[in-house]
Amino acid sequence: MTSGESPPRQTEFVIQTSGAALYDFTTEVTRWVRGGVDRNGLLTLFVRHTSCSLLIQENADPEVQGDLAAFFRRLAPPSTDPSMAYLRHTYEGPDDMPAHIKAAMLPVCLSIPVADGRPVLGTWQGIYLFEHRDAPHRRRVAAHLS
Amino acid sequence: MTSGESPPRQTEFVIQTSGAALYDFTTEVTRWVRGGVDRNGLLTLFVRHTSCSLLIQENADPEVQGDLAAFFRRLAPPSTDPSMAYLRHTYEGPDDMPAHIKAAMLPVCLSIPVADGRPVLGTWQGIYLFEHRDAPHRRRVAAHLS
Amino acid sequence: MTSGESPPRQTEFVIQTSGAALYDFTTEVTRWVRGGVDRNGLLTLFVRHTSCSLLIQENADPEVQGDLAAFFRRLAPPSTDPSMAYLRHTYEGPDDMPAHIKAAMLPVCLSIPVADGRPVLGTWQGIYLFEHRDAPHRRRVAAHLS
């Protein structure tokens, strides 16, 4: 069955976050893509927010995720950091504008080919929601499969 | 009507820029997507240049856009800045190579699911052309709706 | 012939790398897209690794590519650099965690509209595999054309 014969499908994944970190939702995505049908197609994910990101990253050593978060925290530290004194959008909290900066630099959408009902992720690739805010948030990721 | 029944459509958006800043073209995009038909589908935008970017960002407080531009100007300052003395591609002006750097870090393409004729943008998300050059440019963004 | 009438096609490009640099594979991609058929459609590329990237960048002056690599090497230097002493994932070599960082910041996927059998690349745009590791690698890029 080719995607030309299957109608496109859409859904929304909801991810509850509890602080700035990476949240793996690979299993939820691959389960939905499969949906009982072995098809080729194209999966698109789109995060409907401007202070978190999507990310494909290594799923093996959890220290990779910690190091990634540490790097971006140093690159765009809270607006209370002296190096960020030039920021003007600060009234939503010291972690808000740096979150927008990270959301600009990191993916808002991902497009992944699907073969035989599976996203063609490499062996070490997982799909993550990368939360940039400190407070808990309910994040929505739109999905389209064609 | 599903996208499986509608033929794909393509167009090109032209955005005239006047200096390094974010240019909102959300309205033009959503109007074209709608095009009289309530359909589900997938919208793809692709910018045909290497010194500007596409960006999904907050459309509420304009200071967010100013802060974003300020952050990236500090991260990749003009090649006349002592910290950038290692750059060799300087003959197109001090803002050219930093523009290529920003174009590498920020999106060249965006894929957004469309539901009932509307891109599923979050409440605070706008679609921007992020110009990285100082001189005015005429920027072309290819669009595909399937 | 519209893409609605053509079944989607998939392939995989294999790129042998020999050190951190940009590898142009525009010709291979455009040749495959053409495939004898003038059609409109959407091309998606997805790299199946977490320590290299895809990139659309200028294909004219090779110094642009050298400068890009230099910028990202300075932004995320090897873990032996004192500024990166906070990294914990170091057992795969000093170039590994910086490679994951660059892979997070730079595209893992690209979506490019196709018109009349050609990706709508701008005049100066080439498609690159951006290798972030020092040792040779065999990189796989999944492609989907719909």
Image: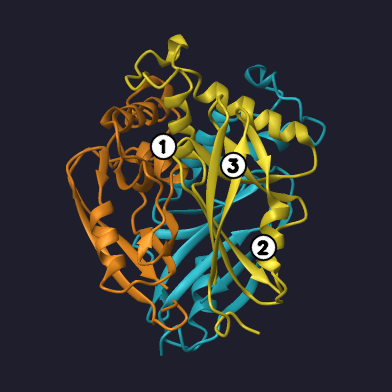
Chain colours: A yellow, B orange, C cyan
Name the residue located 78 percent from the left edge and 55 percent from the top edge: A123
**Pointer 2 and pointer 3 on the same chain:** no
Q: Is residue A2 left or right of residue B55?
A: right
Residue placed most toward the observer, B8 or B125:
B125
Q: CA distance from mark 2 to mark 3?
A: 25 Å
Q: Quadrant of residue A86?
A: top left
Q: Quadrant of residue C105?
A: top right
Task: Please identify, in this view, whether the residue under mark 1 or under mark 3 is nearer the observer.
Answer: 3
The relative height of residue B121 versus residue B143 in the rendered view (above or below) is: above
Task: Please identify, in this view, whether the residue under mark 2 or under mark 1 is nearer the observer.
Answer: 2
Residue placed most toward the observer, C43 or C22:
C43
Chain letter, disc 1 residue: B
Residue at the disc numbered 1: B88
Q: Position of residue B68 (x, y in %)?
A: 36, 31
Residue C14 makes an appearance in the image: no
What amino acid does circle 2 point to? Trp
Which circle marks residue B37 in the picture?
A: none
Residue at the disc numbered 3: C104
Q: Is residue A141 left or right of residue B115?
A: right
The relative height of residue B99 versus residue C28 in the rendered view (above or below) is: above
Q: Residues within 10 Å of mark 1 (few under 14, many from 20)?
A: few
